[in-house]
């Protein structure tokens, strides 16, 4: 078992390395001199040359890549001229809202998707199933930023239930933070519940016809227990996978949602970095997000072995 | 007794396909909506009551009425006309993304499925591309390439090509083991004939299904990119840019944001329903899954 | 009255609703099981054996099937009689597992893969006997020991995938027996097992019947198994009982042509009747329920014209029942 996980980890490390290389070389393809970009229109040729030297931009590309890799491995993702600080620091400062938003959204998505998927499977082919499947299909095809704007109009502007945007004052308490997060998290949660619903439904359908479910009924267990303990217990492995997958998707979704709701998270950071071509920040953010994706996948593999006794050693 | 009659009548593949299509009213409705959207986009100039760029400052932010069915925006432009023209851009971009990603992804998927060596390389890159969230990868690519409609197409094509590669590769791996491909090879049919005729014909339906989904994703992603300001320049009306420029007026004029969004939802939803329906109709084995 | 049967099925019909319309794979089945007796049901695949047993358990798929006729009278432990064909969900749930237990054909898939054997048995015990967690666990171990699983205390913590097929079927039996059922339904419990294990499991079920005095409805398509375990035998053909009798008379003097054909297929007999083999015509495609006449007529070597036109009624004589126009001439 450990061997399997080790092999997976190795494969994922390679994925991460390729992402790194891709990000690095694609960035060099960008039109315009990064040094000139960093310094703005009024910079003199001399200044630009000096900056090129300090950042090693005058060296051959492969050498630059090597140097960059070395820095990345020692935990240095570069320096942002625009933000006047190291990229790692910029990312760390913005991590909290993104983290809470992602986790909170996942919670909401799971609270919608799992019960809906179970109900849909249990009442397969009936009205409830069709209604749930229809809702899931709809939710998956709503642009989250648009839903966010609509929600802001309804719940914040018209009803005044939530703050319109932002993350509250810097010293605000947890409750205040939650109030700011509830609306964006709901938007992300609703949009991302679709995948969970469909997956839960499919995996429940697979097990509801299983022989051991019939055995559970033959024991005289109440239907609730048959479905939740015996059927759902066996559908858990694919559902955990989809939860992990959703968490990875939420990180992408957070980029847009943070912008709509003015949350000072990593997504917001990336968008402004893209708009002003702050490449060190973009590179750093991409690497970190890819790393998180890879870690989530690894975590799913490990979770499998904890949930499913057939894989456990 | 119509049902028993039709079950007795022998059916050709195409007839069977259309019968299934009509039996699924929802799929049919989705197909009709898409058809209408595409026709409207193609003949935008004939349909729209107003020029999409025509500004009338006197009629700024007017609520929907008999003249401006979906109201007017902050410059007095007709929202309905702009949605039709925006659809032209949004659907055009979506279609172009589909064409790029399906042709490139299809080719790479075939190659990966057929040649071991290439497979390892291609799939590693696919894994790496898929390790980044769609929208993040797309804004990164647009940032690198520069913001323009063409670069948005290119970026989204790169984002969605891996999906096509995966689907085509998986089907190719199955098809290449089928007896008739073996037989063709034994008969000395040349390798690329086998690849392009036999395998391609057999992976056509999964590709078609995937293409429909990618179309939907692309329409959604284009809107997202344009909204973030990392997509199509704001002077070209797309559904995304309309929402982006309208959002600050949403308090006073919700229609500026509402209608383009509804257009996106309607089209994306229809594509998704069509894709699901196609999958069911083309491959009954998959019917239960997802 | 002590002689009243434990389970009495009369005229049971089960109808399925499918895409191709309705079908009735069980039509007018009657049979009864007494306490302390094994009633075997034999018949080929698709003859309606499992559907009949699921009807007794109330486990027919609700969405697609219904009991379209007849009654299933079950004499409860409290002395009252319930008609299971019309019982409420709640009543069925109270009986299932507690008074009527079932063992299924597939030991490999009939146990929940993510719960230990002990948990699965304890669950039933806690539900029906109201034991607490510790006592239920102890009961599970006791049951596993009863079905001769070595090292039961340790085995209780095993998951099904740790066990062989024979072992799992024993665990299934332990589960079924855990709440002291009065009636055990065994649907081909040994079909999936190899021959030596099969014999052990049969012996185990018979021993448990003797010890507890429960009634057993034993479903199989193997007459060899019937010979070993049954007191009474009902022969199913295409959803109907074609013959029912005590085991000995049925084996010595089968009356229905189908029963005779089945018996002639037993290896021991096949040799003896070398010159008289053509008793069973080959199956004409799929055995479809015939519209008129005897269901077996298309395959019966003794069939006459009227067999194809008039369905035979069930005749009862000296404790046996038979459904054939010509049994007296043929026998
Ligand atoms: N869920 C169902 N839906 C529709 N028809 C069914 C269903 N279950 C059983 N049947 C039909 O009922 C008939 C009898 O099936 P049953 O399972 O009782 O046969 P059996 O005698 O147990 O056979 P076997 O020896 O293979 O177990 C079959 O023809 C089958 O098609
Ligand atoms: Mg059966």
Image (cartoon, coloured by chain):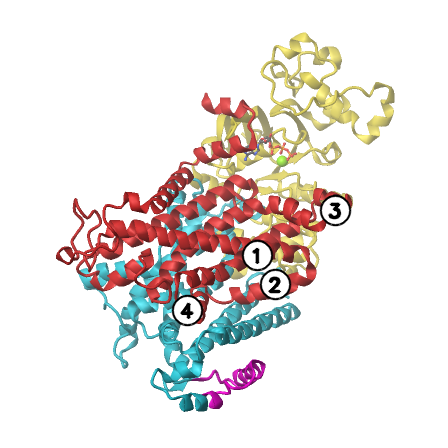
Q: Are marks 4 and 3 on the same chain?
A: yes
Chain letter, cyan in picture? A
Label 2: which secondary element: helix
Q: Nearer the viewer, residue C103 or B234?
A: B234
Q: Colour of chain C?
A: yellow
Q: Which numbered disc, 4 or 1, marks the residue that appears first in the sequence?
A: 4
Q: Which numbered disc, 2 or 4, marks the residue that appears first in the sequence?
A: 2
Please tell me how crowded label 3 is: few (under 14), some (14-19), or many (20+) other residues with Cα within 10 Å: some
Res. C321 image quadrant: top right
State the separation of the CA atoms marked 4 and 3. 46 Å
Quadrant housing the C terminus of chain C = top right
Q: Nearer the viewer, residue C172 or B209?
A: B209
Q: Are marks 2 and 1 in contact (CB under 8 Å)?
A: yes
Mark 4 CB lies closer than 8 A to ligand 1: no
- Asked if A133 appears above or below A260 in the picture, the reply is above
Left/right of residue B92 with respect to residue A76 in the rendered view: left
The residue tagged 2 is B122
State the separation of the CA atoms marked 1 and 3. 24 Å
Please tell me how crowded label 4 is: few (under 14), some (14-19), or many (20+) other residues with Cα within 10 Å: some
Chain hosting mark 3? B
The residue tagged 4 is B146
The residue tagged 3 is B185
Left/right of residue B112 with respect to residue A279 in the rendered view: right
Mark 2 CB lies closer than 8 A to ligand 1: no
- Magenta stretch, residue numbers: A52-79
* Residue C235 placement (x, y as % from top left): 67, 26
Q: Closer to us: mark 2 or mark 4? A: 4
Chain hosting mark 1? B
State the separation of the CA atoms marked 4 and 1. 26 Å
Q: Closer to us: mark 1 or mark 3? A: 3
């Amino acid at each position: 078992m450990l061997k399997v996980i080790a092999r997976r980890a190795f494969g994922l490390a390679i994925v991460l390395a390729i992402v790194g290389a891709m990000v690095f070389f694609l960035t060099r393809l960008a039109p315009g001199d990064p040094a000139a970009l960093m310094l703005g229109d009024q910079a003199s040729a001399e200044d630009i040359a000096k900056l090129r030297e300090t950042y090693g931009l005058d060296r051959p590309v492969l050498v630059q890549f090597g140097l960059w890799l070395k820095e990345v491995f020692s935990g240095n993702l570069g320096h942002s001229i625009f933000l006047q600080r190291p990229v790692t620091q910029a990312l760390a400062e913005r991590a909290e809202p993104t983290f809470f938003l992602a986790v909170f959204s996942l919670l909401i998505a799971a609270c919608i998707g799992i019960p809906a998927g179970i109900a849909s499977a249990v009442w397969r082919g009936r009205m409830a199933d069709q209604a749930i499947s229809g809702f899931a299909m709809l939710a998956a095809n709503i642009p989250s930023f648009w839903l966010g704007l609509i929600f802001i109009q309804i719940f914040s502007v018209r009803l005044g239930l939530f703050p319109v945007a932002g993350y509250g004052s810097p010293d605000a308490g947890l409750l205040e933070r939650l109030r700011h997060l509830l609306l964006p998290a709901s938007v992300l949660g609703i949009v991302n519940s679709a995948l969970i619903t469909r997956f839960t439904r499919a995996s429940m359908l697979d097990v509801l016809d299983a022989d051991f479910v019939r055995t559970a009924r033959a024991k005289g267990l109440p239907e609730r227990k048959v479905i939740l303990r015996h059927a759902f217990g066996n559908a858990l492995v694919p559902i955990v996978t989809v939860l992990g997958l959703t968490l990875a998707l939420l990180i992408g979704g957070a980029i847009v949602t943070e912008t709509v709701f003015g949350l000072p998270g990593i997504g917001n950071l990336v968008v402004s970095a893209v708009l002003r071509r702050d490449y060190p920040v973009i590179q750093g953010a991409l690497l970190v997000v890819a790393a998180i994706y890879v870690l989530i996948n690894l975590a799913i593999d490990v979770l499998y072995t904890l949930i499913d006794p057939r894989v456990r050693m | 007794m119509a049902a028993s009659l039709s079950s007795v009548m022998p059916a050709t593949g195409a007839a069977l396909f259309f019968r299934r299509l009509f039996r699924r009213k929802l799929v049919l409705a989705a197909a009709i909506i898409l058809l209408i959207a595409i026709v409207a986009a193609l003949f935008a100039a004939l349909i729209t009551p107003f020029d999409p760029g025509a500004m009338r400052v006197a009629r700024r932010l007017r609520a929907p009425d008999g003249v401006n069915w979906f109201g007017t925006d902050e410059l007095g432009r007709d929202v309905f006309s702009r949605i039709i023209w925006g659809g032209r851009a949004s659907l055009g971009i979506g279609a172009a993304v589909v064409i790029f990603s399906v042709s490139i992804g299809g080719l790479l998927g075939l190659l990966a499925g057929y040649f071991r060596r290439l497979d390892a390389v291609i799939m590693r890159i696919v894994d790496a591309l898929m390790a980044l969230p769609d929208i993040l990868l797309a804004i990164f690519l647009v940032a690198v390439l520069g913001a323009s409609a063409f670069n948005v197409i290119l970026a989204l094509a790169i984002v969605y090509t891996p999906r096509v590669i995966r689907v085509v590769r998986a089907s190719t791996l199955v098809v290449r083991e089928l007896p008739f491909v073996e037989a063709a090879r034994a008969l000395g049919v040349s390798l690329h004939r086998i690849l392009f005729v036999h395998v391609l014909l057999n992976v056509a339906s999964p590709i078609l299904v995937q293409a429909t989904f990618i179309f939907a994703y692309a329409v959604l992603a284009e809107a997202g990119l344009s909204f973030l300001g990392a997509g199509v320049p704001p002077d070209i009306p797309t559904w995304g840019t309309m929402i982006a420029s309208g959002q600050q007026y949403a308090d006073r004029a919700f229609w500026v944001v509402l209608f383009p969004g509804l257009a996106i939802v309607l089209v994306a939803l229809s594509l998704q329903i069509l894709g699901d329906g196609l999958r069911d109709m083309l491959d009954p084995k998959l019917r239960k899954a997802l | 009255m002590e002689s009243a049967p434990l389970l009495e099925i009369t005229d049971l019909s089960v109808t399925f609703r499918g895409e191709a319309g309705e079908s009735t794979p069980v039509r007018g089945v009657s049979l009864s099981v007494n306490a302390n007796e094994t009633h075997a049901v034999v018949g080929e695949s698709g003859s309606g054996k499992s559907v009949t047993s699921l009807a007794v358990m109330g486990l027919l798929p609700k969405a697609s099937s219904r009991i379209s006729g007849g009654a299933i009278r079950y004499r409860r432990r409290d002395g009252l009689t319930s008609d299971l064909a019309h019982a409420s969900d709640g009543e069925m749930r109270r009986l299932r597992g507690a008074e009527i237990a079932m063992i299924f054909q597939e030991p490999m898939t009939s146990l929940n893969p993510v719960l230990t054997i002990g948990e699965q048995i304890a669950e039933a015990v806690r539900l029906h006997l109201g034991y607490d967690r510790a006592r239920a666990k102890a009961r599970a171990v006791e049951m596993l020991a009863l079905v001769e699983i070595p090292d039961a205390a340790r085995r209780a913590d095993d998951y099904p995938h740790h066990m062989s097929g024979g072992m799992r079927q024993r665990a299934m039996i332990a589960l079924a027996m855990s709440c002291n059922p009065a009636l055990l339904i065994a649907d081909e419990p040994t079909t999936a097992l190899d021959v030596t294990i099969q014999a052990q499991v049969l012996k185990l079920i018979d021993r448990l019947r003797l010890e507890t005095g429960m009634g057993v409805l034993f479903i199989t398509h193997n007459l060899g198994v019937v010979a070993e375990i049954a007191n009474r035998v009902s022969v199913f053909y295409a959803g109907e009982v074609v013959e029912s009798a005590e085991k000995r008379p049925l084996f010595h003097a089968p009356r229905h042509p189908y029963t005779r054909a089945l018996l002639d297929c037993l290896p021991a007999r096949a040799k003896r009747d070398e010159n008289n083999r053509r008793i069973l015509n080959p199956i004409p495609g799929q055995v479809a329920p015939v519209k008129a006449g005897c269901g077996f007529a298309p395959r019966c070597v003794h069939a006459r014209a009227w067999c194809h036109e008039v369905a035979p009624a069930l005749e009862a004589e000296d404790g046996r029942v038979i459904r054939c126009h010509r049994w007296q001439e043929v026998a």
